[in-house]
Amino acid sequence: MNAHFKDAWHHLRHAGSHLGRGVREELRPVERKAREVTGRERPTEPSRRERMRENLRDAEHRAKERSRSAMRDAKNRMRMS
């Protein structure tokens, strides 16, 4: 196979993958609407940003609980002294 055919096959494979991605992207709203109508909506996965926010909220909550616990312990030690 000469270089022209190799180049053509490469471009055809590349175009095919882009075509598939484009079709999926264009049909995504139609799929979503069909799932809503039939009652089979896919559970949405949280985005990276949402996961980061949730992680930050959890860390903040744990820090608050640790500080409150430390304050309770310190107050109890002061009362016992």
Image: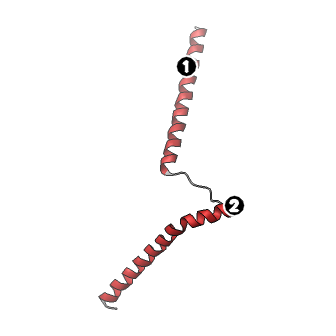
**Residue that badge 2 annotates:** 39
Q: For the point 52% across and 36% down, which residue is it? A: 59
Viewer-side residue, 50 vs 74:
50
Regarding mark 2 in the picture, which secondary structure is present there?
loop
Relative placement, left or right, of 2 versus 78 is left
Residue 45 lies, in percent from the top left, at: 57, 54
Residue that sits furthest to the top in the current view: 81
Q: Outermost residue toward the bottom? A: 1
Q: Choose top left, top right, bottom left or bottom right for residue 32.
A: bottom right
Q: Position of residue 34 (x, y in %)?
A: 63, 65
Q: How is the image coloured?
A: secondary structure
The N terminus: image quadrant:
bottom left
Q: Nearer the viewer, residue 73 or 32?
A: 32
Q: How many numbered discs?
A: 2
Above or below, 55 relative to 79: below
Q: Position of residue 49 (x, y in %)?
A: 48, 48
Give the CA separation, mark 2 to mark 1: 50 Å
* Label 1 Cα neighbours within 10 Å, binned few <14 / some 14-19 / many ≥20: few
At 48% from the left and 50% from the top, the residue drawn is 48
What's the mark number on residue 55? none
Q: What element carries label 1?
A: helix
In this rendering, would 17 be left or right of 79? left
Tell me which amino acid carries mark 1: Met
Residue density around tag 2, few if under 14, some if 14–19, many if 20 or more, within 10 Å: few
Mark with earlier residue (2, 1): 2
User: Residue farthest to the left?
Assistant: 3
At a point 53% along the width and 42% down the height, the residue shown is 54
Identify the residue position indicated by label 1 in the image. Answer: 71
Q: In this view, does 28 lie above or below 75?
A: below
Identify which amino acid the numbered label 2 is placed on: Gly
- x%, y% of residue 4? 31, 88
